Each structure stands twice: as C-alpha cells, then as structure tokens.
Image: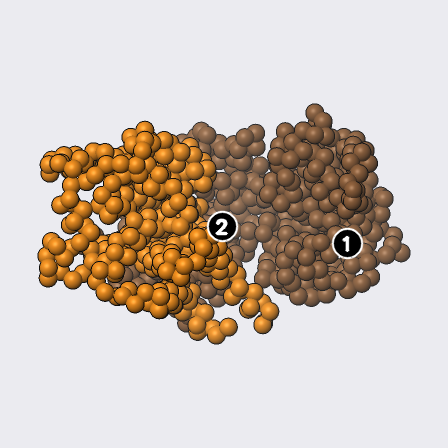
Chain colours: A brown, B orange
Amino acid sequence: MKDISLQVEQTVKTYGGVVALADGNLSVRSGQVTALLGANGSGKSTLSKILTGVIAPNSGRILIDGKPASFNAPDQARRAGISAVYQELSLIPDLTVAENIWLGHEPLRAGFVHRAEMRARTRKLLALFGGLVKPNLQPDAAIDSLTPDERQIVEILKALSFDPRLIILDEATASLDSQQVNRLFELVRDWKTQGMAVVFVSHRMEEIFRIADKASVLRNGHTVGERDIAATNERELVDLMIEGAAVLGRERAPDVPADQPVRLRVQDLKTPVLRGVSLDLRDGELLGLGGLQGQGQADLLMAVFGAIRSSGRITVSGQERHFSHPRQAMQAEVALVPGDRGSEGLLLIRSILENLLLASWNRYNTPIRMPKARADGSTVGDDLKLVMASLDAPVSSLSGGNAQKVVIGKWLLRSPKLLLLNDPTKGIDVGAKAEFYNLLKQLRDAGTAILFYSSDDDELLGLCNRVLVLHDGAVSAELRGDGLTRENLVAASMGAA
Amino acid sequence: MNARLAGLLNRNPYLLSLVLLVLMIVINRALQDNLFEIGPLNGNLRVFTPAILLAVGQTFVIIAGGVDLSVGAILSMTNAILATQIPQEATAGVVVGALALAFGAGLLAGALNGFGVTVLRLQPIVTTYATGFIFSGVALYVLPEPGGRLPRDLTTFWRNPLEVSPDLHIPMAIFVIALLVIFWIVLTNTRYRQFLFATGSQADAAYSTGVRVNRVKFSTYLLSALFATLAALALTLGSGTGNPRAGDQSTLPSIVAVVLGGTRLSGGQGNIVGSIIGAVILGLIGNIISFADLDSWVRPLVDALIIIGALAIPGLIRLARRLLL
C-alpha cells in the first residue's frame, strides 16, 4: 500500500452566519491512528466531511503527500485514497448488502456487473467479522432487514472495500457491542501495520486510549491542541475540550421543595435507543438532559409525548399514561418544543398569528372568533417580546431566535403543565437566547415542570438545578448542586464514571 | 397475511399486476371471441404500443425519485414533427432526416426537463408540468390541425407484417416488447442500474458514496423523452397521420401503468416489465368498456379505482399486520 501523509491547515466552514469550523487543523500519516475529539458542536463532523469531499470548506488548505488538493465531490476524495464510515450511515435501504458495499466500484466483466464476483468479495469482507454477526447477514440480504450494529458493520466494510490509504471512522463504534468493537480494533491494528492511516472520531474516552496514537482536540471550531496518547491522560484531554469555553452567567436555580407534586414520573423507559431510563420531575423544576447528541435524549422526549413507541411506565399528573398520539398528550397539558423548528415546529410560509394559534384553534371555534384570537395572539407576542413587522407577517420573515419564540408561544397559549424542550436554542443568536432563558425561568417560577434537553452544556449548567446525563441510551450520571460542574458533565458525556 | 406470500410480493411486486392481467384477458375474451386471432391481436397490441413505450420511459424517472408530466406533450410534439416532415412521396433520405429532427427535438425536451430539475433544482412536478406547455405549444405551431399522410409502405410495414412477409405470424408490437425486455435485462447488469436505484432510494447517501446523483437524474429525463419520441413514432406509423393533441390524455395513464406494475411512486424500487404489463392492463380495460357497451364515463371511474387500489396495497398490508400483531 502506498504511504500517505495528509495535512489540513486552517480550514473554515460557515453555514450562513453560523460558524461550524473556525480553524480546523489536522495532520495524519501512514501507520498512525489519530483520534479527533471535541465537545458537541466543536466541528468534528464538519472537519471529517471536509476530508471526504462531502462539504467544501470556505477557506484553508488540504495537503496530500505535500501537494495541495481540493475535493469538490466525494468521489474525488475517494480517488485520492480517502474513505469514511459516516456517523449518519450512507447505506441505500433498497439495495442489498453486496450492492451497497460495491456501489460505484462494482467488479465488472465485459462492462457488466459481475454479480458472482461481487458476492464472493462481499463474503470475504463479511468474514472479517465472522462469528460476531448473525448468519442472516449475507451478501444478498436487504439493508432494510438489518439491525443497527449490522448496518454499522456493512458501512465499515464498505469504506474498506475502496482499499483506502486513509480511513475515517466517525463514531463507527456507536452501535457496536463490545466484542464487535474488539474485532474492529484488531482490524485497525492490522491496517496500521499495512500502512493505512486512521482517523478515529469517538465520544468514548476509553476507546481513544485503547486504539489511538495521538489525539487532536477541537473546541468551538478551533483546533486547540494535539497530544501523544502515551503522554497524556483523560483529565488533560477533557480540560482541552472545555478550557476557556464561554461561560453563561451562573445563577444556580433554587432547589425544588420536596412537597411539590411529581408532574412526570418515568420508569424503565425503553425504545430502540433507550435502555431503561427512569426519572422524576416535580412542578416548578427545570430538569436538564445532557450528554452528547444522539444518546437518546430526543427519544426520551418523543416517547413521553407519544410521538414514538416505547415500553415502560410513564406517569403524568399522577395517572399512568401511554400517549399513542400527540393529541392525547396535548389534552393532558403536555407540550413539546421540537428540535427541528423548520420541519416540525412551524408552518414557515404562514403568518405568525396562524402559527401561534395552530394548537389552540378549538378555543376560538364555531364560529371562529377572530378578534379574540388576535387579541390573545398579540398578548403572547408581547410577552415573548417578538421582534416582528406584524402578526400577519410570515414566520419565515423572523430571525431564528424569534421563530423559536413562536414555537414556544404556540404552546404557551395552552398553558401546559409539563413542557418538553428538545434542544430549543440550537442555531439562535445570543440575544434571543438570553430572552429565551428568562422565559424559561418565568415558566418555572410559575410552577411549570420543564424537561430540557440541550446540546449546549453552558445552558444546562446555567439554568438547571439537576441534570441527567445520557450515554448510550442510559442515564450515566445525575448531577446536582456542587456536583454539577463542567468537568463532571463532560466526563459523564464521554461515558466516564 | 401469509408471510411467505408477502415476501414474494415484496421481491416481485409485479406479480399482483400479472394476476390482474390474466383477469382482464379472461373478461376481454368473454366479450370478444376472436381476441386471440392474429388480426385483432395485432391490432390491439399496435394500439397499446405507444402507451407501453411512454410507461417504460416514465419508469426510469420514477425509479430515480422524480416524475415526468411532459411525456404526453413530447409525444404530441414529435408526432406533429414526424407527420409534417414525412410526406406521402418521401424518399428514404427525407425519412431519415425527419427521424433525426424528431428525436433531436425529443431529446432536447428531455434535456430541458433535466436542466430544470438538476441545475435549477426545481421540483420535478413543477418543471415537467410547465415544460409540457412549451412542448404542446410547439406541437400546435408545427401542426395546427390534425393532418399529414405517411407513405403507405411505412405504415403497412408497421400495421400489417403479414403483407411484408406472409410467414410472419407475429405482431410487430411483440418484437418491440421483446426488445424492451432485452434492453431491461442488459441494463440491470450495468452500474447504471445500481446508480439509478441508489439515487431514487436515498439520494444523499448515494451522493456521499460518490454517485453523480445529478447526472443520473438528468439521464432519466433524457430516457423518458427518448421513449416518448419512440411512442410518437409507433403512433405515427399506426395512424399514418399526425395530431397536435395526440398525447393530451396519455401522461397520467403512463404513471398509472408504472404504479400498477409495482414500481414505487416515491422511487428506489421498480422495473419496466411491470410497467409494460400495467400499460396492457389499461388498454384491455379500455377494450372491455367499449365492448361491454358501457357509457364512456365509466372508463375514468375504473381507472381511478385501479390506481387507488394499486397505491393502497402496501398500506393495506401494513394495516393488516398492525391489527393482527
């Protein structure tokens, strides 16, 4: 195999006004495993997508073997010998295992796809994980029929099928069991001796120390340091990941009196992602959900709201409830503010007023009492300090922060007793965030029970008196009082005890 | 629901349409005694051929996740070109020139659709609905009123193969269908087939795997326009004349035929054999309605019931599963 050395220098990537990567640097070479780590939103995935040509950086250089390279499409990076296992899997549901692995570089015979050869080569690749997958994982199996770990393995084999000089494993161990992870690491060690370069992105500290040779740390889009794994420790890396990060004004929320009624009790909640989560939430409490993205926080909120199926006991306002439709949850005075306000929370081209009233039309119905509806809508608009041209302007004319306030406002009209928030401040500006925090405090002080998932650790630290950290679908730590520190939060996010 | 039957249907979604086809043939035969004699058989299949070709072209677009609402208009346009450019006394050179002009115009139309969808990034429905008006306009400009008469040799060759060769007891349309099936079998063994299905199934994943998703989408509109032009050729040879509104009512049936044939309307699954069967079923339904002396309003009603039925089957299977388990 041809040796490779790759340097990424000062890459920048912005989406609109949002900076995903401010100063990304990385250097890798043959026979070396480089761990890429950082907290939520630090730019890890952006940097690895730049390496594979999926997104193009606004500026910066990539040097391969000392020569400048630029990728405009994934197949160009692939030709340079770079392939990746993506966090969001890149498998095609309607194609078979073999067809997926060889998509775009199918073995040919006289110009036609040589299916027998394709199957044989697929079997050879599957043998790498022999004994650790169910016998139904065959070249002709449909992707639809596979479990998450099997899909992950197919994804890994697909990246490997390109015979890359550099392979990027972006959270490739997230859905593998420990034996499968062990096998993957044996393979990685083989690849190293063959001269392959490996970039390993993981949220599991323990794995980084097992497999990586060096670690490169990103913080807020900047590469802040590189360490030899042999000469560092977990504490030092965690400090690098969080050191000097912007701190939100800390005013610790008051403890909730124990005599407040329990508004929400969840016992042993299970979904395909969650592995038995329990919690109690009292009136007037703002309970945080922390951890890295995709550890089951959204599933927990959706399951309580009845938007996805789950097993386990959910008690709302003292009654055991299993909502099978969001409508039932709404009738029980539960509200959910979704994470993706564009697709789930708002009718973008409709007016602000219509959006505010969407969940409450029943109250102004038959015949529609428009003046009353308008009056209530404008009261909510004032309460939220909406910056808008008029209530009749389309929601798409609002800034991100104001649009998010509309999503909340639409539920405030229903005065919910239990408010579920799924990463509500994602992508909104600092000023709007501050107003949003005040709103949350008002609601909490008025006795609303709030379950608050945020991917921004600062918010959890600044607003909550208690935070449950989720890791791999289970609660890895409950932090409260003096134990609620950034160090503990990051450590628990990485699965460290 | 029998699990094995469900699995079989999942892998070969056109099996259901095969059942429907047999049913339609039986009903049609009951109403028309001589259905299987060479004369009526040849006539029927000849009339079905343009619809079959349109449905085949439509299949590619739908598998790749799009839809082409302009196929009827492209058929009208190229039918008008062929009818005006091939006069009764045309020489071989004139005929070749006219064919080149028609196929050039057809492919240009397909390229315009592909441009709108991949470069301008417009919705396929919007793009092809709009371009359809352009192509209809061109058809009316070229041939304002129905007219034109093709050389008798040409139409006879297509209409009545018995006159060309008395030993040939096979309708021309059968050769066309056989060629289409061979074309499909060859295609399913190429990389293009993989790219086509990957694009329709999950375009983002296909893109990050290195598939040139835009090129694939573009190519499907070219193919669809090519088959619409072939359909126009079959129609012109069959009728011997041109009509600027010939394709007005043929776009939606082409989509119905594709759906009947088991191709998933949202893309990623399907095949043209099913679409051919679907087009034949629709043709037979038309026959049955005219032979059974039913009022003409029955036909759209039956079409509607069939498309709703075909679209509802996967949902009904899921519903049954949910209620039973």
Above or below, A394 relative to A324: above
Give how far apart the Cα atoms at labels 1 and 2 are: 35 Å
Count of numbered badges drawn on the protein: 2
Kindly identify the amino acid type of the residue bearing the numbered disc 2: Glu
Q: Label 1 neighbourhood size at 10 Å, few (<14), some (14-19), many (20+)?
A: few
Q: What residue is at 63 percent from the left and 52 percent from the top? A: A298
Q: Let me know if residue B324 appears in the view.
A: yes
Q: Secondary structure at mark 2?
A: loop
Which residue bears the numbered disc 1? A331
Q: Secondary structure at mark 1?
A: helix
> Which residue is situated farthest in the top direction here?
A389
Residue A9 rendering spot, x and y as whole percentages: 43, 33
Q: Position of residue A362 (x, y in %)?
A: 77, 46
Residue drawn at point x = 73 percent, y = 56 percent: A328
**Outermost residue to the front:** B293
Chain letter for mark 2, please.
A
Depth check, mark 1 against mark 2: the one in front is: 1
Q: Which residue is mark 2?
A: A88
Q: Are marks 1 and 2 in contact (CB under 8 Å)?
A: no
